Image (cartoon, rainbow, N blue to C red):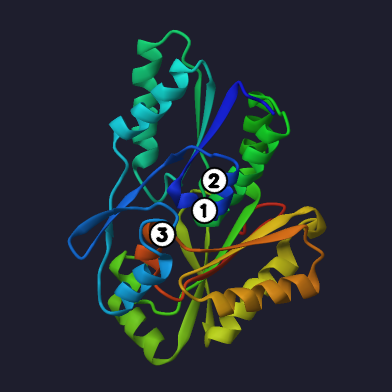
């Protein structure tokens, strides 16, 4: 194991809490407000995922905020004082301004410490799309890879992560400005389920319209069938907004079609879930490149 380097992630990577504990991954925690109380997005440890989404179904409207500069600085400084080189894999700059705050913290510390070695990578990814990059980087570190080998791998492969989402109700995307109120109303009445991905700038983009939940779920699998490269060499990921049965259905279809190394299944965390809502279902895998809508 490379003990000279530390890979830091943030809680928007939505990896299973058990994995974070197993590999002792340092985490920058986002926070959210729910019913007037601030909570830490700590992988369902403080507030179980089910309770969070149950509150949303009852009408709660959670809000999220950026991670401030001082939170990043405190985390980075801890490892600088231990003499470690730092790699921080950040939630997409296309979805949050926190990435810029991390850069500001880095610049402050480089001026303060001559030995500071901090690399910040914009994953341009979200949820377990980001999480798959973290997972592979952490496993590389555990297996003795150098800092530069890990950086090179992440920079090359972040462009290959495919994020495919569907949501159960467009009201949450409407609140975030992803769709208009009129489109959300019509889609919900007509049982239209959007299928979305994340583009090269790290933005969430609607791509397809599926008639009904099952069709949307099949579309996630068909996207992998068309685009995935060497699936037998991949660990792929599925996450869900309190929709475990649907996640297991997608996992079974993936297993039927591909001999993947493993499938990570976990809930969408509260920060991502605040904007996508209950019933979110996502499939993440590596392709030759990110899917770009050419229409």
Q: Do the residues labelled 2 and 1 touch (CB within 8 Å)?
A: yes
**Looking at the image, which residue is at 48% across and 37% down?**
26
Q: Are marks 3 and 1 in contact (CB under 8 Å)?
A: no
> Where is 209 relative to 85, above or below?
below
Does residue 231 appear left or right of residue 80 in this picture?
A: right
Q: Position of residue 2 (x, y in %)?
A: 67, 26
Element at badge 2?
helix
Q: How far apart are marks 2 and 1 (CA)?
A: 6 Å
Q: Where is residue 93 in the image (x, y as percent from the top left)?
A: 42, 44
Residue 292: which quarter of the image? bottom right
Question: Which residue is labeled 1 in the image?
Answer: 17
Whether residue 183 is visible to the viewer of this picture, yes or no, is yes
* Nearer to us in this view, 1 or 293: 1
Residue 272, label in figure: 3
Q: How many labels does the image show?
A: 3
**Looking at the image, which residue is at 73% across and 34% down?**
143
């Amino acid at each position: 194991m490379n003990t000279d380097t530390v890979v830091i992630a943030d809680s928007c990577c939505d990896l299973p809490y058990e994995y974070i504990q197993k590999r002792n991954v340092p985490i920058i925690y986002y926070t959210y407000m729910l019913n007037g109380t601030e909570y830490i997005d700590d992988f369902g440890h403080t507030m179980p995922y089910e309770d969070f989404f149950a509150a949303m179904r009852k009408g709660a409207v959670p809000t999220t905020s950026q991670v401030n500069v001082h939170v990043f600085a405190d985390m980075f400084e801890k490892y600088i004082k231990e003499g470690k080189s730092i790699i921080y894999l950040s939630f997409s700059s296309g979805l949050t301004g926190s990435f810029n705050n991390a850069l500001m913290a880095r610049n402050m510390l480089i001026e303060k410490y001559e030995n500071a070695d901090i690399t910040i990578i914009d994953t341009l990814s979200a949820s377990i799309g980001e999480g798959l990059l973290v997972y592979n980087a952490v496993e590389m570190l555990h297996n003795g890879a150098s800092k530069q080998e890990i950086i090179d791998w992440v920079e090359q492969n972040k462009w290959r992560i495919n994020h495919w989402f569907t949501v159960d109700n467009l009201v949450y995307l409407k609140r975030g400005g992803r769709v208009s109120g009129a489109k959300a109303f019509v889609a919900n009445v007509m049982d239209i389920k959007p299928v979305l991905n994340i583009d090269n700038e790290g933005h969430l983009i609607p791509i397809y319209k599926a008639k009904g939940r099952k069709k949307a779920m099949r579309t996630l699998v068909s996207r992998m069938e068309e685009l995935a490269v060497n699936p037998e060499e991949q660990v792929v990921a599925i996450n869900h907004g309190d929709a475990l049965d649907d996640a297991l259905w997608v996992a079974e279809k993936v297993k039927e079609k591909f001999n993947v190394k493993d499938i990570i299944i976990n809930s969408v965390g509260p920060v991502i879930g605040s904007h996508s809502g209950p019933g979110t279902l996502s499939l993440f895998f590596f392709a030759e490149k990110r899917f770009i809508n050419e229409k």
